Image (tube, helix red, strand yellow):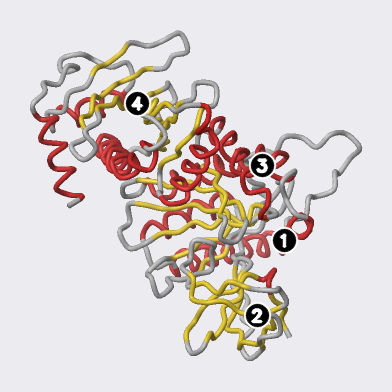
Amino acid sequence: MKKLLIFLLLAIGTVLCSAAAAEQAAYAGTRAFVAELDRAGQPYTLDGPDEDGCEYVLLQSADAPFDYTVTVMFDANQENASLRVWYVIEYAPERYDEVMRVCNALNARSRFACFYADDSDSTVTASMDLIFRGQDAGAVTWKAVRHLTGELNAAWPLLQACAVTAEANRNTPRPPVTSTPAPVRTTEPSREASATPEPVQSIKGRTIVITADSALVRSAPNAAGSYVGTAGPGERFACLGTANGWYAIDYHGRRAYVHTSKAELE
Amino acid sequence: MKRTLIAALLALLLLCPCLAAGETANYAATQAFIDALSERDIACRLHGLDSTGTETVTVQVADGNTGVRYTVRLTFDASGDVVILTVPEVITYGEMHRDAVIRACNTLNSSFMYTRFIADEARSAVDVSLTLLLGGQDTGDVMLEAFDRLVSILSEAYFTLAVYGG
């Protein structure tokens, strides 16, 4: 009887937590998507809307061959969403032509993902964009995430060969569980995973120090964000938070972003 | 300017009869697209099922911006939830331009949403495609939006590629 009561309380708590997370979303498309994630037992982080009106849902790779974050972006128009995996790898600038050929080959064999090399920061991005209507938003977006991650995981061996060591450390390949070859990644998320959203970490009051020779400062926490400026080694900025591999900083009075690989938290 | 060009393009399409009108598609998604085109009096051609169970619809487009005519091919399968829009051979290029074309495709892929520009080295041709995931609501309307986006993007992107071939 006692166990039954505890089970019921946990079940009610889970339902209430999921409902609360879904209600936090500003847009109907986002709400439909996170409700789909809750049903699938897929952990996520909800963020935004930011000053551009963009709302983000961040998903960590689960049983993929390397660590990455899928960022799903919704805006107020309710009929589109964009999926991005930034910093799939970082490559040496002199290998730009080689990486472009790899991306082209991957695009030729992919049905859903689009891969491209960004020579401004020598990284590769995987993208997919969606068009939907009404309540289709949740199911279509969740299906898209699985297609994108499936193709991204399949692409990893080719991309990994182009990655610089530092990036290979950041997107750490997971050690094989057994001595047998690692299986092709499944696109089905674990249904036993926790549905509790991971909050965006708040680290206000601390500072970051730039450790790279030169760090690009961007208007948004992604490689597509427009450049606000640059920062050199040793420069310090007030840290406003962190999400998805980027530090939000106070950059001369405005909110801007620096990739975490270019700075350290003090 | 862009809207004017698209309007001019659509007006040109209006002059053509819908070749597929009256034909019945095998898949509901295919039929929804044909019906949506028919409502806008846009010409299309329905091709039968091939040996893999894929059904194809083609639409001829004359782009008023570039002066180029090309074919948009939509392929549907039995799943009913994936449609792939492709424009094959946007350009064909000489071997000496191969690296430059791959670079141009990469630039276009980073600049435009929805589409993938691919340099096929075996055919020395650039194809562009857009993959659409369908839900259950307003599939014809969604496919038309995807079609319009593809045509619009290609109209803008064409001149980037045209310097390497035609």
Q: Name the residue under label 4.
A: B74
Residue B86 visible in the snapshot:
no
Q: Which chain hosts label 1? A: A
Decide: marks 1, 3 in contact (CB < 8 A)? no
Callout 4: SS: strand
Task: Name the amino acid, label 4.
Answer: Leu
Q: Mark 1 points at which residue?
A: A3
- Real-space CA distance between mark 1 and mark 4, rounded to the nearest whole angstrom: 56 Å
Count the marks: how many?
4
Callout 2: SS: loop
Query: Residue shown at 19%/27% (left/top)?
Result: B35
Q: Name the residue under label 3.
A: A153
* Same chain shared by disc 4 and disc 3: no
Task: Name the amino acid, label 2.
Answer: Gly
| Residue found at the very far left of the displayed protein | B15
Q: Mark 2 points at which residue?
A: A232
* Same chain shared by disc 2 and disc 1: yes
Query: Residue shown at 47%/50% (left/top)?
Result: B110
Q: Which of marks 2 and 3 is in front?
A: 2
**Residue B62 in the image, given as x and y percentages of width and height:** 20, 30
Query: Residue shown at 62%/55% (left/top)?
Result: A123
- Real-space CA distance between mark 4 and mark 3, rounded to the nearest whole angstrom: 27 Å
* Same chain shared by disc 2 and disc 3: yes
Task: Name the amino acid, label 3.
Answer: Asn
